Amino acid sequence: MKTDALISALTADGKKRSPAPHVLITAVAIGTIVSVIALLATIGVRDDLAAALLTWRFDVKLVVIALALVIAVCDAFRLIRPTGRSLLASFNTLPLAVLAVAMITELVLSPVSTWAPKLIGTNALLCLVVIPLLSLPVLIALLIAMRHGAPSSAISAGASAGRLAACISAFLYGLHCFDDSPLFVAVWYPLAALPVVAAAAFAGRLTLRW
Amino acid sequence: MPEDLSNLMRAANSGDADSYRVLLTALAARLRGTVRSKLAHMNKDPQDVEDIVQETLLAIHLKRHTWDETAPLEPWVRAIAHHKMIDALRRRGFREHVNIDDIADELRTAPTSDPSASSDCARLLKTLPARQRRIIEAIAIEGRSAREVAEVFGSTEGAIRVALHRSLKALARAFREVRR
């Protein structure tokens, strides 16, 4: 077929699709709503939520996750465009630095004998199971939305979807979990997020080619 | 010039079909030049030029909502073209060692087809469902409007447009699966 003929066909197809970022916002919103409902319908949030908000460990936990979440959102929105590049890696040092300061504070404030119990926590296994499960609605919605985009790297875009889904899920799980020590957060939350990111990168490779 | 292209795309996005045609024609000419020199540089078959140009135009069309209207169009087009070029070369065995004896026969068979036509595209069209193919052909090759095609098919103009969009997506998918 002649290129001019193809151009005629393309010109006749006036179907205007919504801008890629709008689709991504919708996906995050729908996925998050499903995850929130899933959380409330199953394990729920902790009973002492209001009291917990007055403790520094609980707040720092949510702040660190929220910082990681903001970076993940920025990355996902950048990577759906063919011209998009990830944010500089140095941005990631922000949540890590907050977490590091919190860990040092924890070590200074707590007797050595409590370090191991705080690190092991009481809910580690639940954390490893619930975070990947709760991330699924967001991840699936995001991957579908990203097919609407044009990422230059399908694997990176998939991984960014995984990171964003894991951050939302971790935040929600953080509202349930009683293990607020930065020592616990630094070990178990990344361990729970890792398989989500890996699976999302692999899924991205399969589904985000264009 | 770059501003002109961005303006054309903005006009096209607000429904100006004439601007869109001018834009795509200009982009096709540019792409043809770039792809031809890249393929020549790598001693690849120049017959593939138009296949790659058409696949890139399809991608530009189907992904145009990923362009940020406040940004210049050119870097975006270059990113799409780069992506499609890499993809096309990989599918054509970019990394494989090519024996000159193997391609000598191919080189001897002079290009019989029109250099501004894509043989892939014509072949891939045949793999689409009959209705999709006939809609594309009626609009692209016979130059009919969606309304005229709708009358022929006893359908509505809207339904024909939806079918055309689906056909173009299917065509882009078929392009992606070409292996050499």
Image (spheres, coloured by chain):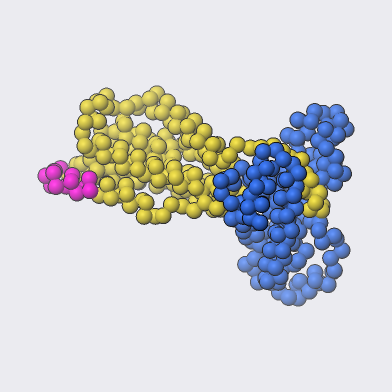
Residue shown at 65% from the left, 47% from the top:
B7
The residue lying toward the viewer, choosing from A118 and B54, is B54
Find residue A201 and report its horizontal and vertical position in percent.
49, 49
| Horizontal and vertical percent position of residue A13 | 73, 40
The answer to which image quadrant residue B98 occupies is bottom right
Q: Is residue A48 magenta?
A: no
Vertical order, B37 against A185 (above or below): below
Color of chain B here?
A: blue
Q: Is residue B3 left or right of residue A32?
A: right
- Front in this rendered view, residue A81 or B95: A81
Q: Is residue B173 visible?
A: no
Corner quadrant of residue A121: top left
Q: Please give the name of the residue rendered at 26% of the width and 39% of the height, measured from the top-left corner.
A: A60
Residue A150 visible in image: yes
Q: Nearer the viewer, residue A19 or B108?
A: A19
The residue stretch that appears in magenta: A101-114
Residue A78 at x, y percent in the picture: 50, 47
Q: How many numbered circles are shown? A: 0
Q: Residue visible at 75% across and 67% down? A: B45
x and y percentages locating residue B142 in the rendered image: 87, 44
Which residue reaches farthest bottom? B101
Q: Against B46, is B100 above or below? A: below
Location of residue A169 (image quadrant): top left
Provide the letter of the chain coloured yellow. Answer: A
